[in-house]
Image: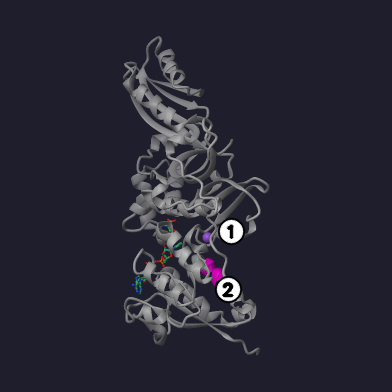
Amino acid sequence: MIEYRSIRVALLGAGSVGSQVARLLLEQGDELANRIGARIELVGIAVRDVDAPRDVALPRELLTTDAESLILGADIVIELMGGLEPARTLILKAVSSGADVVSGNKALLATHGPELFAAAEQVGAQLSYEAAVGGAIPIIRPLRDSLAGDRIDRILGIVNGTTNFILDRMDTTGASLEDALATATELGYAEADPTADIGGYDAAQKAAILASLAFHTSVPVDRVHREGITGVTAAQVESAKRAGYVVKLLAICERLADPETGEEGVSARVYPAMVHRSHPLAAVHGANNAVFVEAAAAGPLMFYGAGAGGVQTASAVLGDLVAIARRHVLGGPGTAESTHAELPVLEIGRITTRYAITIEAADQPGVLATIAHVFADHGVSVGELEQTINDENGRATLVIGTHEARESALAETVAALADSPVVTSVASVIRVEGAE
Ligand SMILES: NC(=O)C1=CN([C@@H]2O[C@H](COP(=O)(O)OP(=O)(O)OC[C@H]3O[C@@H](n4cnc5c(N)ncnc54)[C@H](O)[C@@H]3O)[C@@H](O)[C@H]2O)C=CC1
Ligand SMILES: N[C@@H](CC=O)C(=O)O
Ligand code: NA
C-alpha cells in the first residue's frame, strides 16, 4: 500500500447531495487516493442537527454543527448546504483561510458569483461548481476547459428536470399543467413548493451561470429574462404537436450583434418555447436535462443526462474535488474565472426569434387581409398560417407562425392585434427556437 499524504476536506451540508458525497468519499477512499496521488481525509461534516435521522448512515464522530470551526484548517471545502447565507460567508471564510472550494449552489453563484470568484482569484484559490448546472452532466468544465479555445455563439439548455417532466407529460398524454404537476409531485420530482421550478427561477440561475462562463462576462441572475411554464396550456401543447413541435422550457444564452448599431452583446433568457421535433432537444424526455452548445469551430454539441438527484449530482462534486486535489499534488494556483469580455447584457426587446401567435377572430371576408396588414405594418413577416373554424360560435382560430422578428416589433404587433376590431382575442404567443 502506497503511503500518500492527506488532503483535508470539510463537507458543509449532508442533504440529498452532501450525504452521497460523504458516502462515496468514505467508500472509495483507496481508489480516489490512487487516482489523485494523495488521500482525501474527510475531516468533518457540518449539519444542522447531529442527531437527525438520515437516509445515509454517516459516522457520528464526523458530524458537527460548527461549520465555521470545521473550515479552518481544511484544504478543500465542499459547500452543499444551498441558499445564500450562511453559504456565502462560509465560502468567503474558506477561501480567505487558504482553502479551495467546491459548490453546487446555483442560487449563490448566480447572485454572488463575481464576489466569490474575485475572492478566490485574489488568493489563487479554486472555486469549482460543476454540480450547479445540469447536475451530473459535465457542462461547466467543457465550457471552461475543453471549449476554452473556441467561441461560443449560443447555448440552448433544458436545465430544469421538473418542468421538462411536466411539459413532456403534457405532450405525451395530453394532460393539463395542473395534472402533470401533480404527477411530478407524486413521483418526487417537484418540491412541495414547486415555484422555483415552474416559475423558471431555477433555470434562470443556471442561465446566468452558463452565460457568464460562455461569454466571459458577468451575467447576474437579475439580468436574465425569465418566464416560467405556468401559462402553458394543453391547447398550446396540442397545437404545437400538430405543427410538428414540442414545448420545452429553454435557458437561452446568446451572443448577438445589434442589426442597427452593430454593437455586440449577450442575451440570457428563460421561457417556454416550441422546438421542432427534429431538433436534438425535442428528444429530451422525462426529468432529464440537456445543454445544446453552438460553438464557432466545434459546431453543435449536445450534453445530456441526469440534471438532478443526490448520487448523480455527487458525481459532479467528486469530479471537481479530484481535479482540485490533483492540483494540490502538482502545485500551482487555481484557474480564475474569466470575465474579460464584459459584453453588455441586452434587454429582451433586442433579441430576434420566431413566434407562433394564436388569434381568435371573426370568420368574415377581409379579416385575414386586415390581420396580415397589422403584421406588415410592424415589419413582422408571416411564415405559416393555420385556420380552423368553430362551427358553434362562427369564429376562426388562426395560428400564425412568423419568420425571425425582433421581440420589440412582435410585442407592438401583438398589442395592435389585440386592439384590432376584427380580432376577438390574442389567445397565446409562444416563441419558436432551434433551427428545423
Ligand atoms: N438535489 C439535487 O439534485 C441538486 C442539488 N444541487 C445543489 O446542491 C446543493 C445541495 O442540494 P441538496 O443536497 O439537494 O439540498 P438539501 O436541502 O437536501 O441539503 C442541504 C443540507 O444542508 C443542511 N444545511 C443547511 N444550512 C445549514 C447550516 N447552516 N449548517 C449546517 N447544515 C446546513 C440542511 O440541513 C440539509 O441537510 C444546493 O445548492 C442545490 O441547489 C445542484 C444540482 C442538483
Ligand atoms: N429542481 C431542479 C433540481 C436540480 O437542479 C430540477 O428540477 O431540475
Ligand atoms: Na453539471
- Residue at 39%, 29% (x, y): give it: 411
Q: Which residues are magenta?
A: 314-323
**Residue 252, placed above or below residue 140:** above
What residue is rendered at 39% in x and 60% in y? 188
Dot 1: element? helix
Q: Quadrant of ligand 1?
A: bottom left
Chief SS of the magenta region: helix
Task: Say left or right for 272 vs 149.
Answer: left
Q: Quadrant of residue 37?
A: bottom right
Q: Residues within 10 Å of mark 2 (few under 14, many from 20)?
A: some
Q: Which residue is mark 1?
A: 144
Residue 322 shows which numbered tag? 2
The location of residue 75, given as percent across then percent down, is 50, 79
- Image coords of residue 372 (percent x, y): 45, 17
C-alpha span from label 1 to label 2: 17 Å
Q: Is residue 261 left or right of residue 415?
A: right
Relative to 396, residue 73 above or below: below
Give how far across and how far down residue 320 sits, in percent. 55, 69
Nearer the observer, disc 1 or disc 2? 1
